[in-house]
Amino acid sequence: MNSVSLDIADKFLSVAPTVVSGTKGGTADWSIFINSQPTKPVNVFSVWDTPGRPPSYSFDKSKNPLKYSAFQLRTRGTNHDTSRAKLEAAVKALVQLGRFLITGSDPDVIYMNISETGSDIIPLTEQDNKDNFLWAANLTAIRREKDA
């Protein structure tokens, strides 16, 4: 099963092309990076794997348990309002996905739900050392491997 950050970055590129105008690991503004945030481009998204909850064996009768995989979605941008609005749009796009399937991984993965984890979008710092604005949102993806 892929890391949740990899799956989310790939899915995000396909469902929110007006929010993410770059590519995965690209050099265009609003590209998305996985578990890293390079200094360029300045305006970026990044997805970070964070600790989740233990798997649940009691609510799903398939042979594969539900996993509660947590991740953090971040933006860094030169404009306060734009960087926050980009993150709000990204969170909304992911939460509205509902159930979907990630194919091409080994094995395929069914995503049941993506939800925010109780906190609103938060600033990571007032500004970084280059006067950029940093925002973060914490989310959880409920997912499981697809039965063979």
Image: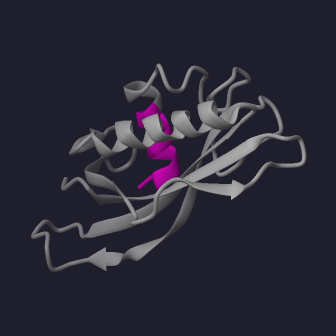
Q: Which residues are magenta?
A: 1-12
Q: Is residue 97 left or right of residue 27?
A: left
Work out whether residue 104 or residue 22 is closer to the camera in this orientation and state it: 22
* 132 vs 56, nearest the viewer: 132
Q: Is residue 91 left or right of residue 100?
A: right
Q: Is residue 26 visible?
A: yes
x, y percent for residue 87? 52, 40
**Colour pattern of the rendering:** one colour
Quarter holding the N terminus is bottom left
**Residue drawn at point x = 85 percent, y = 41 percent:** 131
**Which residue does the image show at 50% across and 58% down from the upper left?**
71
Q: Is residue 32 visible?
A: no
Q: Is residue 20 above or below residue 59?
A: above
Q: Residue at the left extreme?
A: 61
Instruction: Judge left or right: residue 16 versus residue 85.
Output: left
Give the quarter of the image for residue 27.
top right
Q: Left or right: 78 with respect to 9?
A: right
